[in-house]
């Protein structure tokens, strides 16, 4: 009876009061409004990733099937999220902004609940106020590009999932219980499934947890709880997976799903490195990250300080073991392919945020007995948390305050494309950077834009685009100078225009994008001018 009463009190103490949730919600929506280039504060998001996701998401709503009708390599859950965003706000990124804000709100609430296990309510509040700045802008202090980039990476949406794992681990170990409930394990399996079908390299933290959890139970010869837990985790994963497989099965896209999401991803980015070579590569990338972002190193140092300080207690040993293993596997999964993309570090930030809590835990004793200043301190902290995005935010230069939104290449070309009823478009040799969205056009070819794949690894991509142009299947072609130079089928070295493009299409516009200094060209099918 006493145990049930104690657990009931713990659950009540774990709840966040409605006014605090409202404040976190306000902070989340304001922070994302200023940082994310998906918000109405920006004309559009120029990053290729979000444009790919939105093009595929929009395609789903209009009956196109990912991988089969639209070649892209992320997981289907990400595309379904963007289909939802398109249904909510239409042909723009505002729906993504709403999803990002809700994701950040969830992260803030989870972070606050984690902080409450280490800090007083007041200090947990102060630490949480600056989490958006830590996630979205702190890396801008050290480099021109933050790991958040312009918003809408797959890693960004994984942030709450990783924080949830850390929260449950800390809650259980603080209660001196290693046994995880059926609901905990089912939720872990469900989240693992969602992460797996978003971007399978993001499941590393959960894999690390499973390894530690399984090893501990097996060493204790607790086979009953191990088998039961394994079944429950598998059930959660199955619940996340079944609707996805049914969607592709009913749309005759199951083969395309496995071919692109697994086979193409695993074979076109391969490496000849040995196991030790991969480990060295991962360690090197992590060290490079610390060098590029010293703030990360400071947070890691604070976390190491906490570990050394608290390692003696048995419950802390389990907690530290679980989180350290989860971090190690998250790092391996995220950095194993050797690609130097900065946003890969975003999925590790939940672990580094524990160093943020450790910093406040170190500061807290210096402020004891100063409760009279709590209201003034709270108001000042809220003001600083809102002010921070204006002070440390490289994305502001792309906002409507600094960029003439009606003069981007995307909108200039869209006006020309709109003159042709039901026009079709191909992004030839370049990534999807928003021309489909600006013109409100759906791709008619699976290979609708250039992916980061070398020709020798997947020739079907470039050959497919060339065939579309040779057969005059689209009304307009968008390309850039780099794509034209790369082509090996030229009329002459001076023109740098592929023969099949020059024969079938004519240049009607060109413009340099002030945001990335790329010059884009719009070609029109000669059949349109002959009519």
Image (tube, grey):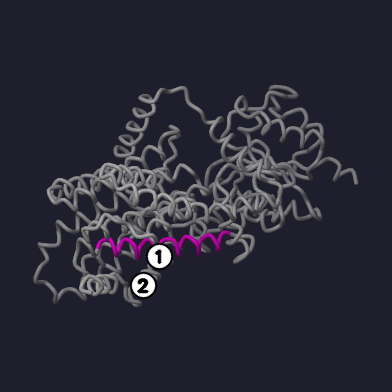
Give the quadrant of the N terminus.
Answer: bottom left
Task: Locate residue 374, reporting x and y percent.
Answer: 18, 73
* In this view, 393 is above or below 522: below
Considering the numbered disc 2 on the image, is that residue within a helix, a strand or a loop? helix
- Work out whether mark 2 precedes mark 1 in sequence or the reverse, and give the earlier one: 2
Query: Predominant secondary structure in magenta?
Result: helix
Find out whether the residues at labels 2 and 1 contact each other: C-beta distance under 8 Å: yes
Task: Locate residue 18, reporting x and y percent.
Answer: 35, 77
In the rendered image, is residue 339 in sight?
A: yes
Quick one: label 2, few (<14), some, or many (20+) residues within 10 Å?
A: some
Quick one: label 1, few (<14), some, or many (20+) residues within 10 Å?
A: many
* In this view, 213 is above or below 389: above
**Residue at the spot of label 1:** 105
Task: Locate residue 244, reporting x and y percent.
Answer: 59, 52
Q: Which residues are magenta?
A: 93-115
* In this view, 311 is above or below 287: below
Q: Nearer the viewer, residue 147 or 156?
A: 156
Q: Which mark is residue 21?
A: 2
Quadrant in which residue 528 is drawn: top right
At x 49%, y 43%, the residue is 200
In the rendered image, is residue 156 in sight?
A: no
* In this view, 34 is above or below 304: below
């Amino acid at each position: 009876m006493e145990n049930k009463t104690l657990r009931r009190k713990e659950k009540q103490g774990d709840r966040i009061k409605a006014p605090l949730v409202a404040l976190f919600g306000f902070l989340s929506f304001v922070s994302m409004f200023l940082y994310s280039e998906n918000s109405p504060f920006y004309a559009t998001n120029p990053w290729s990733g979000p444009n790919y996701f939105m093009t595929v998401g929009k395609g789903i709503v209009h009956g196109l099937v990912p991988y089969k009708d639209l070649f892209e390599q992320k997981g289907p859950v990400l595309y379904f999220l963007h289909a939802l965003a398109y249904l909510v706000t239409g042909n723009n990124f505002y729906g993504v902004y709403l999803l990002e804000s809700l994701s950040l709100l969830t992260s803030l609430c989870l972070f606050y609940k984690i902080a409450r296990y280490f800090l007083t309510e007041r200090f947990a509040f102060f630490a949480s106020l600056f989490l958006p700045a830590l996630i979205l802008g702190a890396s801008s202090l050290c480099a021109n590009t933050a790991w958040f980039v312009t918003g809408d990476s797959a890693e960004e949406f994984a942030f709450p999932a990783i924080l949830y794992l850390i929260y449950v681990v800390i809650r259980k170990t603080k209660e001196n219980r290693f046994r995880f409930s059926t609901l905990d394990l089912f939720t872990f399996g469900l989240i693992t499934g969602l992460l797996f079908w978003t971007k399978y390299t993001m499941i590393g933290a959960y894999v690390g947890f499973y390894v530690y959890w399984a090893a501990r139970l097996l060493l204790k010869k607790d086979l009953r709880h191990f088998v039961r837990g394994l079944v429950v985790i598998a059930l959660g994963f199955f619940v996340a997976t079944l609707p996805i497989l049914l969607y592709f099965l009913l749309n005759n896209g199951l083969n395309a799903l496995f071919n692109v999401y697994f086979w193409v991803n695993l074979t076109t980015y391969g490496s000849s490195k040995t196991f030790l070579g991969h480990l060295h590569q991962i360690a090197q990338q992590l060290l490079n990250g610390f060098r590029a972002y010293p703030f990360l190193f400071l947070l890691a140092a604070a976390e190491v300080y906490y570990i050394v300080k608290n390692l003696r207690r048995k419950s802390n040993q389990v907690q530290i073991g679980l989180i350290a293993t989860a971090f190690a596997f998250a790092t391996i999964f995220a950095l194993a392919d050797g690609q130097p993309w900065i946003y890969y570090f975003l999925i590790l930030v939940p672990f580094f945020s524990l160093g943020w809590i450790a910093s406040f835990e170190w500061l807290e004793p210096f402020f004891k007995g100063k409760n009279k200043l709590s209201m003034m301190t709270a108001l000042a902290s809220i003001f600083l948390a809102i002010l921070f995005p204006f002070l440390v935010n490289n994305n502001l230069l792309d906002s409507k305050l600094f960029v003439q939104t009606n003069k981007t290449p995307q909108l200039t070309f869209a006006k020309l494309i709109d003159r042709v009823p039901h026009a079709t478009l191909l992004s030839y040799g370049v990534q999807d950077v928003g021309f489909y969205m600006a013109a409100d056009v759906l791709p008619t070819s699976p290979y609708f834009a250039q992916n980061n794949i070398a020709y020798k690894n997947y020739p079907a991509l470039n050959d497919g685009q060339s065939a579309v142009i040779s057969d005059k299947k689209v009304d307009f072609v968008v390309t850039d100078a780099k794509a034209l130079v790369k082509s090996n089928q030229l009329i002459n070295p001076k023109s740098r225009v592929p023969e099949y493009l020059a024969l079938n299409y004519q240049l009607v516009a060109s413009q340099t994008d002030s945001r990335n200094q790329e010059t884009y060209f719009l070609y029109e099918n000669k059949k349109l001018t002959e009519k």
